[in-house]
Image (spheres, rainbow, N blue to C red):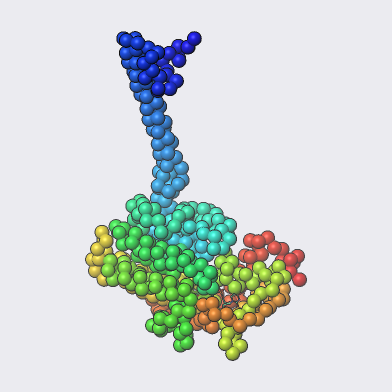
Amino acid sequence: MRGLEEEFIPSTPGKFKDKTYYSGNRQLHRCFASTSTMFLWALFLLALTASYLSFQSFMDSGTRYLSSTWGSLHWEKQVRDSAQIHRVNGMSVLVTGAAGFVGSHVSIALKKRGDGVVGIDNFNNYYDPSLKKARKNLLNLQNVFLIEGDINDVHMLAKLFDIVAFTHVMHLAAQAGVRYAMENPKSYVHSNIAGLVTLLEACKNANPQPAIVWASSSSVYGLNEKVPFSESDRTDQPASLYAATKKAGEEITHTYNHIYGLSITGLRFFTVYGPWGRPDMAYFSFTRNILQGKPITVYRGKNRVDLARDFTYIDDIVKGCVGSLDTAGKSTGSGGKKRGPAMFRIFNLGNTSPVTVPMMVAMLEKHLKVKAKKHVLDMPGNGDVPFTHANISLAQKELGYKPTTNLQTGLGKFVRWYLSYYGYRQEKSVK
Ligand SMILES: O=C(O)[C@H]1O[C@H](OP(=O)(O)OP(=O)(O)OC[C@H]2O[C@@H](n3ccc(=O)[nH]c3=O)[C@H](O)[C@@H]2O)[C@H](O)[C@@H](O)[C@H]1O
């Protein structure tokens, strides 16, 4: 015997058509009854689906508005709070690459003097992201809100400029490293070209437009042999893709200055070093290897000439960055249209006293109290230049830039930081 349920719910649709089983009105009636039952069930299922979907969307929007993912109300509040200015004539600065070496130092310096700062960083794994996370913790302690995001994210940038009228952008996000460009060329195009253009588009569309200070590089001088390097020297002979993308950045920013009235200051950094530095750089990786008793490779130039760099200490670079922000003229455009000529500047930020790589190693040995195991190799053709040497008179005049830390002192500070950060006890680990 069929149960009640079975009476009203046909097990298969085909049963409706089984004319031999039912006859006359009864068949018609059952058929009608079954159709309305099906209709009711369909209605029920439809309602169920609709309520499920609206529940989902409620949950989604709930998460969006309550969580810290970008675009949420909580996120917006964090951005606004962090951008808040706490001094007279202060600025609100969007710092890109804020979990990076220079970015974290500049963000903290600005925040400490009362400027509003919002950071953005994509936390890529070019080098140990845990160091970037540690820098993020430092920023948190100073109440700098750091967004995990990419400067190629058009919507996120638009949203940021929507919520905050940033007066300045300190653009430090980049794919760094001279030699890595041969391994991963696309990452340079992604960050240093595409990312730069995306950011400039957002700045150009912002109302008011912010003034932009950004990191170019000493590497733009490439094969230039005239010393010291002055801003007016030729920069059309880059020796690496990294240098070429930085040079392209200088041209691209010029275009945005020319067409849209964006105020632009490009800073050519000369081999920046110091506490919380980049593990891919020679002074950092040498320190690690020396402490671990591993060999280091010291490159040598043509005719056995030592390579040299105008190593520049991080605190001096921070002063140069802050000085650039303080002296930057306003952008003149609005609504994506230029309203008048805007400032366009390029400065060298170096130390003016190059030191050879073997001398730098000797200083590290002294601070670490360990002898390095050196392998000397001829410089491979991988984008390196034999020397750098900055003429900084323009930055001195316009920004009041005056580096005060020599390499010996700066490396001492770096080594102290390194030993404490990585938990070495100097008297135990070094012989
Ligand atoms: O001013 C810049 O525009 C750039 O500075 C920095 O580049 P560089 O000056 O090349 O610094 P870095 O790699 O520390 O090599 C230093 C020296 O050590 C030599 N070097 C390097 C590695 C090695 O294993 N052996 C060695 O001898 C090497 O041949 C070189 O002579 C930034 O990384 C770069 O992002 C950019 O900002």
Q: Is residue 407 visible?
A: yes
Q: Residue at x 67, y 70 (%)?
A: 289
Q: Residue at x 65, y 61 (%)?
A: 422
Query: On the rendering, which quadrant does ligand 1 occupy?
Result: bottom right
Query: Which residue occupies the foreground of this view, 213 or 159?
Result: 159
Q: Quadrant of the C terminus?
A: bottom right
Q: Which residue in the rendered view is the most extreme toward the front?
A: 20
Q: Position of residue 278 (x, y in %)?
A: 56, 66
User: Seen in the image, is 114 located left or right of residue 179?
Assistant: left
Give the image location of residue 315, x and y in percent: 52, 69
**Residue 15 horizontal/vertical position (percent):** 40, 19
Image mark count: 0
Side of 197 relative to 332 (left or right) = right
Q: Residue at x 70, y 63 (%)?
A: 424
Classify residue 259 by image quadrant: bottom left
Residue closest to the eye, 115 or 253: 253
Residue 87 visible to an observer of this rendering: no
Residue beneath the point at 49% across and 9% down: 1
Residue 255 as seen in the image, left or right of residue 145: left
Residue 99, horizontal then vertical, whole percent: 51, 59
Residue 256: image quadrant is: bottom left
Residue closest to the far left = 339
Q: Quadrant of residue 281?
A: bottom right
Residue nearest the observer in this picture, 22 or 329: 22
